[in-house]
Amino acid sequence: MLAMDTQATISGDRPDFSNHWMPFTANRDFHREPKMLCRAQGCHYYGERGQQILDGCSGLFTTPAGHARAEIADAVRDQLLTLDYAPSFTRGHPQSFRLASSIADLTPEGMDRIFFGNSGSEAVETALKVALAYHRARGEGGRDLFVSRERAYHGVNFGGIALSGMVPNRRAFGPAGPRVVHMRHTWLEQNRGTMGQPVHGSELADDLERLVALHGAENIAACVVEPIAGSTGVLVPPQGYLERLRELCTRYGILLIFDEVITGFGRLGHNYAAQAFGVTPDIITMAKAITNGAQPMAAVAVSREIHDTIVDAAPEGQVEFFHGYTFSAHPASCAAALATLNIYRNESLFDRARQMSAHFLERIASLQDLELVTDVRGYGLLAGVDLAPLERPGLRGHIAQKRMFDAGLHLKTTGDAAIIAPAFIMETEQIDTLIDTLRGVLVELAD
Ligand code: PMP
């Protein structure tokens, strides 16, 4: 039985579903069996019948401080009534500078030049353009090839899908966008069932050296990796792997870009994965948790050296970086992000994520005894659980995701992997409920 919340609105007539073409959704299936979220509070969503749904994925990795935070809502409202919109092309507004300084306080030393966008995908495109502009500014314009990884997800724009080593992208859209070559992903049979950083596989980073030998360092702009590949199943980097990538990038003049759209803002118990793993890249992309999900926003942190090289190369009075979005640094998004970072700081939520991690990962590991579970992995408050596939890859995940919703649990599935990312404010008992519900659904599905 699901817990019912008497305060939740029991919706009246359903809206007409025919006009909204939903993203990343099996639309026909959704129309037959709509899974609607109508309200959210703390660690819960509430559905159409007022039924309580535990949010096991912090929205979509967006909401670590829990839903409906009044401080954020108030800040957005105040901002909209003070300065609702301001272009940030050749005009400034105070909030964006304040926010950039607050983000620079969190990033690794020296990575303190911050560019704003509205989504993870935009952050990725921005990072690629920064890399190209940097090399051109140094007279190394031949460096236009990017290195990425199989089983990577870097968003949906052309740069992002070229980087993303995901087969469905190629199938749907072909090889569009910038030139990209791929290293292997870091999932290894020997590491099955490992929580934290696996022991085996640091040598996979040598794929970068192989690609340098093949394509020439003078042609390679940047190496782009998610420190933990999140959306493709939570692939934690083997011990020594990121360190080795850093070493090779430095040796060959290749920029190292960490896509921290999921791992940024405390998900691993540290500000960024860069600090969690002790490896400093040249560029960091971030989005998702930057406003606790309350407003669309993304940012790219760039080292001072890269920023200054690009800026100094342009003549006085000329735009130095020919890039930006109408809604870059939107005042309401800045206000939401400032309020969010205050909450993270005042409630020491990144520390809390680190403290809750041991219990969370232990409970995730306990799922290994299930017939349907083929692997479990995790770090911080982020975990992936692989499910045995049915006749078509992804079908098991699709069915599981629907059953979980019906059982009162919101999780993300990618292919046949369930991705779990609780809010940092979750109580131990809620984590237990999350795992118990997941276990119940998986046992039922095996039957
Ligand atoms: N990069 C990474 C690592 C991501 O996980 C995502 C989103 N899952 C993106 C980029 C794209 O972000 P968005 O959906 O906000 O465009």
Image: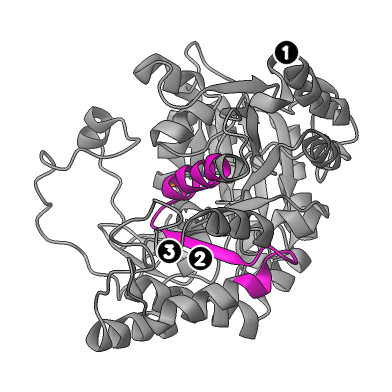
Tell me the crowding category of disc 3: few under 14, some 14 to 19, or many 20 or more residues within 10 angstroms, Cα based.
many
User: From the viewer's perspective, is the residue at label 3 or at label 1 nearer?
Assistant: 1
Q: Verify CB contact (< 8 Å) between mark 3 and mark 1.
A: no
Quadrant containing the C terminus in the rendered view:
top right
Q: Magenta part of the protein: which range?
A: 104-133
Q: What residue type is disc 2 on? A: Ile
Please indicate whether residue 15 sits to the left or right of residue 326 in the image.
left
Q: Residue 121: within the magenta? A: yes
**Residue name at image x 63 percent, y 51 percent:** 283
Disc 1, SS? helix
Upstream in sequence: badge 3 or badge 1: 1
- Residue lying at the far front of the rendered structure: 315
Is 426 in front, or is 154?
A: 154
Residue 131: x %, y % from top left: 57, 43
**Residue name at image x 80 percent, y 29 percent:** 205
Residue 294: x %, y % from top left: 39, 68
Does the beta carbon of the residue at mark 1 sit less than 8 Å from ligand 1? no
Q: What residue type is disc 1 on? A: Leu
User: From the viewer's perspective, is the residue at label 3 or at label 2 nearer?
Assistant: 2
Residue 162: x %, y % from top left: 48, 26
**Residue 342 shows up from this direction:** yes
- Res. 354 image quadrant: bottom right
Please indicate whether residue 243 sits to the left or right of residue 446 in the image.
right
Q: CA distance from mark 2 to mark 1?
A: 38 Å
Residue labelled with disc 1: 214
Residue labelled with disc 2: 290
Residue labelled with disc 3: 293
